[in-house]
Image (cartoon, rainbow, N blue to C red):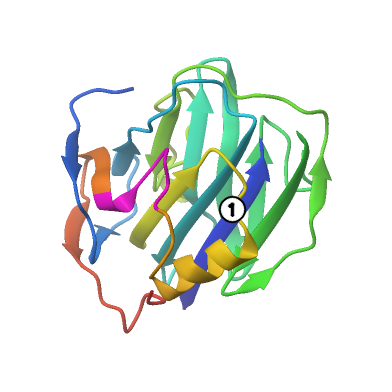
Amino acid sequence: MKQLLILLAALCAGHAEEKDLSGKVFTFPVQSATSSVQLIANVEQPLTVLTMCMRFFSSLTRAQSLFSLDIPSQSNAFLLFKLSVGVYRLHVNGATLKISGLGLTALWVNEKRSPRAIMGAKVSLTGVPSIILGQDQDTYGGGFDQSQSFVGEISDVHMWDKVISPCEIRFYMDGSGFTPGNLLNWKNLRFSTTGTVYEEQSDFNKLSCF
């Protein structure tokens, strides 16, 4: 099951290393209440708009968390949750995929875009974000549930403090000519891992390639 996921939405640092992860994936081999990757974003001001792009591969059909961003004052500030095969739920500032922020939100999966949607009143995400791959944060930086944990591979995570254009999305899909994320950049990523998570060479026969 290949998945290429791109998200457009309006919208902790502990010990972390900084690496170029080009050609690499994070592998989550087993379900767990502890295994996760914490990403450190270069956020210097409140976020009122963002774009997040990622690739993932998983053979699981159960619900699992892909990308979780919390702020101290708000759980599920920006959460991407895969409910089942081909079915996703987006949370923005606590509201769910009927889509909440007076801003436009669109979900791209395998080169197909969902209808744009309006998500409630315009808000900003203020405070140091806690960004976790592979777990859903029920509390800031924790509160993980094994039954919602991700099992599979995640790669090429980028995040910008703007809405990128469809042309830029195409460049990201093709893997050339796109400007890396200014908040999260896979080619210069600050991160730390917890539990059973491995950093491995990517298998582009499984993951949608650049």
| Predominant SS along the magenta part | loop
Q: List x then y, in percent, for residue 16.
A: 20, 32
Assign a secondary structure to mark 1.
Answer: loop
User: Which amino acid lies under the numbered mark 1 shown in the image of this protein?
Assistant: Ile
Q: Is 196 colored magenta in this rendering?
A: no
Q: Residues within 10 Å of mark 1 (few under 14, many from 20)?
A: some
**Quadrant in the rendering for residue 35:** top left
77, above or below 174, in the image: above
In the rendered image, residue 97, in percent from the top left (x then y), is placed at 73, 48
Which residue is located at x 27 percent, y 52 percent? Answer: 187
Tell me: 177 left or right of 203: right
Q: Determine whether 210 is above or below 130 in the image.
A: below
- Nearer-the-camera pick, 15 or 65: 15
The residue beneath circle 1 is 164
Residue 57 drawn at (x, y percent) = 40, 69
| Percent coordinates x, y for residue 75 in the rendering | 57, 26
Relative to 107, is 200 on the left or the right? left
Image quadrant occupied by the C terminus: bottom left
Residue 138 visible, this orientation? no
| Magenta highlight range | 180-187
The residue that appears at 57% across and 41% down in the rendered structure is: 79
Answer above or below: position of 36 versus 156.
Answer: above
In the image shown, does 83 or 129 lie closer to the viewer? 129
The residue lying at 45 percent from left, 26 percent from top is: 129
Apparent side of residue 179 relative to residue 191 in the rendered image (left or right): right
